[in-house]
Image (tube, helix red, strand yellow):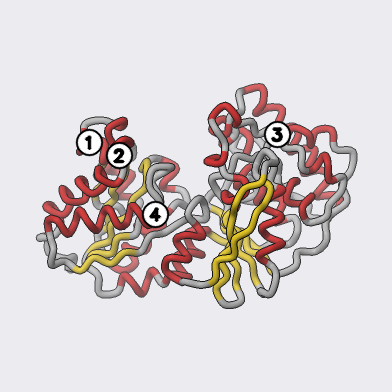
Amino acid sequence: MRVVVAPDSFGGTLSAVEAATAVADGWHEVAPDDDVVLLPLSDGGPGFVDVLGASLGGDRRPCTVCGPLGASTAAEVLVVGDVAYVEAAHAAGLHLLDVNERDPRRTTTFGVGELVTVAAAGVNRVVVGLGGTATNDGGAGLWAALGAEPSALLRAGGGALVDLPEVFPPHPLPAGVVVATDVDNPLLGPNGASAVYGPQKGAGRAAVLDLDDALRRWAELVEAVTGWQGLRDQPGAGAAGGLGFGLLALGAAQASGFGVVADALGLAGRLAGADLLVTGEGSFDSQSLRGKVVSGAAAAAQQAGLPCIVIAGQVAVGRQDAAAAGVDDAYAVADTLGSADAALTAGAAGVRETAARVARLWSTRPARP
């Protein structure tokens, strides 16, 4: 049996590469003769660069940039041929802050702009993976890093934008830029960056309202100076706390983060001749079905005529919704070990044990006709 193992990362517990290895190890405990192909995936969020580098190789360029609260942080750019890949979370990631430091009124995307500048040297295209950021500044910090003024206000975090009197745009982007997004939220309103993602970044109800007002002021100034009217309503403008908006306003193209990775890694070709696709992530929930790795992998499996199963830390999607997305079955590490806390504590060992349980059920099944 040929099994393609193509998970996303498991939150802050396992990288996609580590998760794929754990699934393969558990599967081989039960079915050592199965051909298990590892293809860790990403939708543009944390792990974007590692996943691409693991499969494509390329040149990793280490650098030091501004972190979400201004302190220097280590990051890297992946260069493959004439394309450079940047992970916004390297400079502005939620994982870079302790829980008590999270405040999207203060966090900045300045370091992402620095990463884009480093990445653009000597390449024709820069692909920026969005997701997993601690920021809600609409990309104002990135604008400041690229030369926009007033720099001090632009890099001071999303809350400062409400006092912005005017904005002078930055220099043109030094290379063609593609924004790889994992969500389709607009910038503002009840489905916007502040309301939907602000709370997980540390914003209470009052802060969410203040941030939405600040981003509205930012949008008005940006749309006026660039001529991009209505950009605030474009799907994906709210990605990464509005970083999508800031990049799109500078002329960046937009693409599905999952699609970028799947195309670069040749997912469709890897599924040819396979019997089963195993994907997964930390929590298989309603957000998983909207542009995330699991939904994209399931759709690819459907196109290839393969069954698709999910191994996740927790499963909160019902069978009917999962089936509608192309998922044949889903298995939770929490169920295997007895609780969500046990699943988090076990890490790779829990994923490995669950994969062994799944292999007992699936390795002997005949492939779909």
- What is the C-alpha distance between the residues marked 2 and 3? 38 Å
Q: Is residue 61 visible?
A: yes
- Please tell me how crowded label 3 is: few (under 14), some (14-19), or many (20+) other residues with Cα within 10 Å: many
Q: Residue at x 31, y 35 (%)?
A: 345
Q: Earlier in the sequence, mark 1 or mark 2?
A: 2
Q: Earlier in the sequence, mark 1 or mark 4?
A: 4
* In-image side of 54 versus 324 (left or right): right
- What is the C-alpha distance between the residues marked 1 and 2? 15 Å
Which amino acid lies under the numbered mark 4 shown in the image of this protein?
Answer: Ala
| Residue 114, percent from left and from top | 71, 56
Report the residue marked by disc 4. Answer: 16
- What is the C-alpha distance between the residues marked 1 and 3? 39 Å
Which amino acid lies under the numbered mark 3 shown in the image of this protein?
Answer: Arg
Name the mark on residue 335. Answer: 1
Q: Earlier in the sequence, mark 1 or mark 3?
A: 3
Q: Is residue 347 above or below residue 293?
A: above
Location of residue 341 by image quarter: top left
Label 4 near label 2: C-beta < 8 Å?
A: no
- What is the C-alpha distance between the residues marked 1 and 4? 21 Å
Q: Is residue 231 visible?
A: no
Which amino acid lies under the numbered mark 1 shown in the image of this protein?
Answer: Asp
- What is the C-alpha distance between the residues marked 4 and 3? 30 Å
Q: Name the quarter where the C terminus is drawn.
A: bottom left
- Please tell me how crowded label 2 is: few (under 14), some (14-19), or many (20+) other residues with Cα within 10 Å: few
Where disc 2 sits, the SS reads loop
- Please tell me how crowded label 1 is: few (under 14), some (14-19), or many (20+) other residues with Cα within 10 Å: some
Where disc 1 sits, the SS reads helix
| Front-lying residue, 113 or 317 | 113
Q: Tell which tag, 1 or 3, sits nearer the viewer.
A: 3
Q: Residue at x 89, y 38 (%)?
A: 165
Report the residue marked by disc 2. Answer: 318
Which amino acid lies under the numbered mark 2 shown in the image of this protein?
Answer: Gly
